[in-house]
Amino acid sequence: MSAALLAWARAALTHCQTSAATPAFSRSACYVSASAAKQQKPASNQPIWRPAQFGRHNYSSQAGSSRQSAGRLYLGYTLGSAAGLGAVAVYLGNKADDGTAMFATLQSVPRTAQAAWWGAEAGLAYKRLMSRYADHDSQECKDALSHTHHVLAQKLLRVCQSNGGVYIKAAQTFSTIQAIPKEYRKTLEVLQDQVEPGPVEDVAEVLLRELGAPASQLFAEFEPEARAAASLAQVHKARLHDGRQVAVKVQYLGLEAAVAADMTTLSALSTAAAWLFPTSFKLGWVLDDLRRNLDLELDFQLEAENASKLTRLLKGRKDVMAPAAIPHSADSSANGNKDVSGLGGEEPAKLSTKKVITMEWIEGCKVNDQAALLQASIRPQDVAVLLLDAFAEMTYVHGFVHGDPHPGNILVRPVPNQGFWWRHFSRWKQPQIVLLDHGLYLTIPDKLRHQYCQLWCSFVMYNHQTAIALGTAIAGPRGGELLPAILRPGGLKTVSPEERKRLRSQAGVDNFGDLGQLLEALPRSLVEILRVSATVRGTSAQLGAPLTDRLRVNAVHAMNGMAQSADASRPVEYIGDLQSKTCRMRISATVYALRAWAWISSSFRDMYFWCQPVAADPAAC
C-alpha cells in the first residue's frame, strides 16, 4: 500500500526529470545516510500510534470526520481524487451482497482520501524540487532531495499510523526494501514492532466468535494487555489449564472486510496515478501481489500449517525453531482422562481457527537488538551468520522460505541445550533464532531453485559467462546481465559507472516506471526471493556479518541444493560450464575449503578469547 503511494511520489520525481537526469542505477548517491537527517521520534508522553477518528482497529465502528483540509494549492486535486474514489467505493459497495462489506468499503474512503492527499503533496513537492535545480547531480540538490525524502517520510508514517491495517502491513514490507531511500526506510521501520494494540473488548468479541467461549473459560490466565501488536493482529500471553504458557494471536475485529475495502479504493488510486503519470507509474502488479499475500496472511490456519512444515524441514537443526501451534486444549488421553479445557465437557476446547491462533510462548530478544544479545552472552556476529545460514538453507535446499523476515518477526535466545564446544571452549552461548508470523511463505518452483543455486555456484568460480547464461534463463534477455551484477558479492557497488550505464541501457531501464515494468516481467517467485534476501542481508550486515560469510554460506547451500531434485525421475538440468562434472567437482572442493577455513578460524578465535582475562565490556570480545 505504502509502496504504491511512494511509487506515485517517485513517479512524479521521474516524470519531471529530463534525459540528462541522474541514471536510475547511480541515483543511490542522492540518498544520504540517516545520520545526516535524524529520525524524528514522537514525544514520550504521546502514543506512537494515533488512531484515526473513524476507528483504528475496530473497523466496524462508525466513521468520523475526515482530517483537517483547507487552504492548500492542491486542495481541489485532493478532494477531486477523494470524491472519485468515494463514487467508486459506493458503487462497488452497493454491488456487495454483505452489508458489512458495503459499510467497510464506505469507511475506507476517508483512509484513501488521506493517502491521496499525501500522494498529491509528495508529487508536487518532488516536481517543485526538481524544477528548482538545473543540475540534479549537485550536492545542493542532493541535500534538498534528502530533506524532502525525510519530511515526506514522516508524513507518510503518520498516514500509515492513522489508517492502520493494510497500510501498516505495506509499510513494514516497504521498510525492508533496500532500493528505497534510506530516509523512508529508517522512518517506516518503527512500524515493525511499535504498533498500538486494539481495545481488549474487541479481542474478547473475536475470541467469543471464533472459539465459542470467553477467555476466562478457555485459559487459566489471560493477560488483557497485549504483549505485541502488528499490522493484522495482536498477541496476548496466556496460560492453559494444564500449565503451559502460550501466545494467543488475535486478528483485529472487522479486519477482513476493511482489507477488501482498502484494496478496492487503493486500486482506484493506483489507476488514477497511472493515468496522471503514464510513463512512470506502472506498478499495479504491486497491489496485486499485496492482495494475494494478504489473503494468505489473514488465514491463521495456513500459518499453523506453514510453521509445522518448516519444523519438519529443519528438524535436524536445534539452532532454528518455529513455535508450535496448539489447535486444541490438552485432550483427555494426554492427561489421565482429566478434563483440562475449563469448559467441563468431554471434548477439548478449540484454541485455533482462521482468525485466532494459539502457539507456545517463547521468550527472546529482537534479532537486531545488539545490547540485549550481548547481555544474554550471545555474539551478534554469530546471530548474523546463523540468520544467513537458515534462510540460505530454506532458499537453496528446501525452496520453502519465510516471506516476512523483518526484525520484528525474529527472536533470538540461547539454544536450550548448549553443545560441547560452546559449553567448554567459548565465552559465548550458541544462539537460536525463533521465527514468528508464518502467514506468508514463498514456495520456489524446483526449476527456478536449481537455476538460482547454479547462479551462486558460478559466482564461486568467477565464471562470468555461465552467470550471464543463468541470469538470462531466470530473468530473460533484459535482465540476463543485470541479475548477476545485482546478486554477486558487492553487487553494483563493484561495477564502474560506465558499465552500470551499459547494463541500465541493455535492460531498458531509464526511469522508475521502466524498472517497474522490468520487475513485473520477472517471475514472481524471483522478485520475492530478491526481496527476502535483501531483508536478511540488511539485518545480518547490521549485526556485523562480513561479505565473505555471506558468500561462503550461500555457496555451501547452493552447492547442496543444486544436486537435489523434488522429482527424482527428472535429472537436474545444468547450464553453461556447470554441465561439466569436473567443474562441479571444483566447486565442491572450493566450498569445502571455505567451510574448513571458516571452522578453523572461528575455533581459534573462540579459544583465544577463552584464554584471555574476562573483559569488563562483553562487546570488547
Image (cartoon, rainbow, N blue to C red):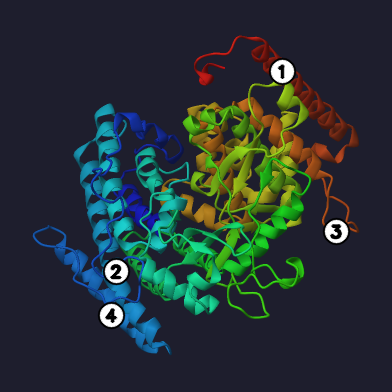
Secondary-structure class at tag 2: loop
Mark 4 and mark 3 lie on one chain; the one further toward the N terminus is: 4
Could you say whether the residue bearing mark 3 is in a helix, strand or loop? loop
Most foreground residue, 221 or 568:
221
**Residue pointed to by mark 2:** 55
Q: Which numbered disc flags the more N-terminal residue, 1 or 3? A: 3
Q: Is residue 433 visible?
A: yes
Label 4 crowd bin: few (<14), some (14–19), many (20+), radius 10 Å: some
- Residue 13 to residue 239: above or below: above
For badge 3, the amino acid type reads Asp
Q: Which residue is mark 1?
A: 601
Picture coordinates of residue 518, whole percent (x, y):
53, 52
- Relative image position of residue 334 (x, y in whole percent): 75, 66
Label 1 sits on what residue type? Ser
Measured along the vertical axis of the image, is residue 209 above or below residue 610? Answer: below
Residue type, label 2:
Gly
Q: Secondary structure at mark 1?
A: helix
